[in-house]
Amino acid sequence: MNLAYEQEDSLQTDLLPKASAANIERILRNLNHFNSTPEFGTTRVLFTEPEVAARNYIKQEMQQLGLSIREDAAGNIFGTYEGTEPVLAPIWTGSHIDTVLNAGMFDGMSGVVAGLESIRLLEEAQLRPRRSIVVVVYTSEEPTRFGLGCLGSRALAGKLGAEEAKKLKDKDGKSLYEVLQSLDFPVDHFDEVPVRRGDVKAAVELHIDQTGELEREGKTLGIVRTICAPSVYDFKVTGRQSHAGGTSMARRRDALMASAEMALAAEELTKASLGPDDYATATVGRMNVIPGAVNVIPGEVDFSLDVRDASFAHKKELTQKILGKFEEIAAKRQVKLTGKEYNDDHPMPCSEEIQAKLTAAAEELGIPYMKTISGAFHDSMLVGEFAPVGMLFVPSRDGISHSPQEWTDFEDIAAGTDVLARALYALADE
Ligand SMILES: [Zn+2]
């Protein structure tokens, strides 16, 4: 691209009006009415009545912006702002509108609303880029109903087809496939859901920061370099169940004490080795003690381990160290250790080009930003399997999310939208 062309781009986005915090607040508050637990936070679980109503409401907002609307077999919603050369691969932006139980009104929704507001700004400035811009609502980023997250983006990445959708069951035994079918989604066309690499030019997601880092650093925006990916394991430790009073300390083969030592070792090893991005986490979030009685030495313990890292190579190295240590502890304490790996995902590096566009827009607007990594994963991690992705974070008070206390100032989402709209235009006009 030559310099004259670049100047033209930035002159064009100078025409963009500023995002309206009031309009962003209006849509977010309207969305928040679709809620199963209005007395305690926001609960909007996939394909429950409020979630379906929220989908219809977003489609209404899309219609008012003149977007053409399409839904796929996996329930993803696409609202397209057509470019002057609609045959070119489009630019996507969006996030999710489902929530965990008793959540807040920002996680996910902010990204969808920022996408809609970006389109409103482009329309107001009468700017139509070459490529279409598509606002996407991904189906069920949260695993609340089917125990698996990122259902829509997973299907788009070709990792959840009709067969998998038939096997995924909610707690009432209903499959995702059945539910989609009952809501008239085109389930016969599940094979058309996956996106081929090259079919989407770039995808940018605005999301709330879930660590509190932006607030602590006094920055309005975080431009994400990498999305961390988890490795998830289940372990079973078998010792010897015996009487608490009758078994001397020396003779015990206590499954809980062994598990506790393993959990502490995972913490210690991770703290000591944060890797090249200075970010790795290890979490034992679940521990099940059997038989779980006050006067019995636990004979068996099941526990989970979740390891996340910004570098795949480092995650491998760290998990090997942790597993090695677990075996050492098991041998020392004479308990049996078995384990199962559930997934070992690759962290998703964000596209350098998208980061550069977001950075240029933030600098042009004088909005304080920082480069950051995402410890939590998002739909963008799966979208990244078929398109270059970028993520933009806005501050979250005290870093709290998945809670009724979740709060982001509407002005901060507006600032993020100003940057998002400029970056979307720059990407779409190439
Ligand atoms: Zn989210």
Image: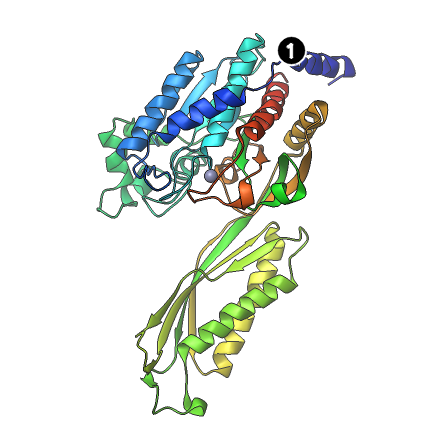
Residue 412: horizontal and vertical position, in percent? 58, 30
Q: Image point 74% across, 14% down: which residue? A: 7
Res 319 quadrant in image? bottom right
Pick the quarter of the image with the N terminus: top right
Specify whether 101 is left or right of 402: left
The quarter of the displayed image where residue 398 is located: top right
Question: Which residue lies most toward the top here?
Answer: 126
325, 37: nearer the viewer: 37
Q: Dot 1, how many residues are within 10 Å of its Cα: few (below 14), some (14-19), or many (20+)?
A: some
Residue 149's quadrant in the figure?
top left
Colouring scheme, one of rainbow, by chain, secondary structure, one colour:
rainbow
Above or below, 403 against 56 in this view is below
- Where residue 89 appears, as percent x and y from the top left, is 54, 21
Residue 85 shows in this picture:
no
Picture quarter with the C terminus: top right
Q: Which residue is mark 1?
A: 15
- Kind of residue sitting beneath label 1: Leu
Label 1 CB-ligand 1 distance < 8 A: no
Residue positioned most to the front: 39
- Across and down, in percent, residue 56 comes to 33, 23
Q: Is residue 136 left or right of residue 182?
A: right
Query: Is 28 placed left or right of 308 in the picture?
Result: left
Does residue 103 lie above or below 424 as drawn?
Answer: below
